[in-house]
Image (cartoon, rainbow, N blue to C red):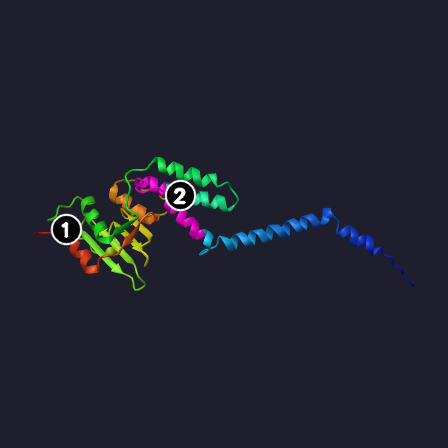
Amino acid sequence: MQITIDLDLPTIISQAVSAERIQPLVDKAIADAVGSAIRDATSYGSQFREALKTQLKEAMPHGLSIEDVAKFQHMANAAVSDAVKGANSAAIKTAIAEGIKAAIPDVPTKIKLSELVKEARGAFHKDEHEAFYAHYEPSEYGGGWLSLDSDESTSSEYRADIRIAFNSKGEAYSLKLDGRDITPKSVPDAAGRFDGLLLSLYVGRSTIDLDLGAHDVEAAAEAQYD
């Protein structure tokens, strides 16, 4: 038995590559390419991310109250996430505007470690002849960990109410405040200039100049006598 199949190949091919069939494939290919390009362009270490980091630092006000800084950080993270997904950049402008409304006196863009320890003395309500706990542990890679507590008898840096970590550029990357680890979604209850300084360091509005060594930090926290 012989079976003959006569296919109209030109017509079949013509129908297969018709606009209504090809268009969805083209759209998907373009969307995949654009998505890949966006991920590459906005990935960690990209020029976009570094430029955005710089611009947000310049736009965000110094010296927000402690809860406003944490809320602003959360708003900014959400706004940036929405913007990358295609939301209008007005979301970021709105977040910044709301943060600026809550601004209080400015904090410096860079603060010395010696000044931070001095600020801690005032925040702990310690007179010059009184001591408090201060411990600085330098990292072999630069930066280090600063622990502070109003109780001079604190037994360990890990038990201190305040512990903040810095990289070699003086940028803070973790903060424990009042014994609680701070995250962009956690909103501290207390407020004050010293707390504001710590939060400004944590969110990148300020950096620290590590002008003291470990021994000097401990000495600055001791009772001071003329």
Q: Residue at x 44, y 41 (%)?
A: 92
Q: Vertical placement of 98 versus 112: above or below?
A: above
Question: Is 13 placed left or right of 115 in the picture?
Answer: right
The residue nearer to you, when weighing 79 against 89, is: 89
Q: Is residue 53 magenta?
A: yes
| CA–CA distance in space, label 2 to label 1 | 36 Å
Q: Position of residue 118 (x, y in %)?
A: 19, 49
Give the SS element for disc 1: loop
Q: Position of residue 133 (x, y in %)?
A: 19, 52
Q: Quadrant of residue 36?
A: bottom right
Q: Of all residues shown, which one is farthest toward the top?
A: 101
Q: Residues within 10 Å of mark 1 (few under 14, many from 20)?
A: many
Question: Is 216 placed left or right of 45 in the picture?
Answer: left
The residue nearer to you, when weighing 61 against 1, is: 61
- Quarter of the image that includes the N terminus: bottom right
Q: Vertical placement of 83 versus 153: above or below?
A: above
Image mark for residue 131: 1
Question: Is 170 placed left or right of 213 in the picture?
Answer: right
Q: Which residue is mark 2?
A: 74
Three-letter amino acid code at disc 2?
His
Three-letter amino acid code at disc 1?
Ala
Q: Residue at x 82, y 52 (%)?
A: 11
Span shown in magenta: 49-71
Question: Is 197 placed left or right of 77 in the picture?
Answer: left
Q: Position of residue 73 (x, y in %)?
A: 38, 44
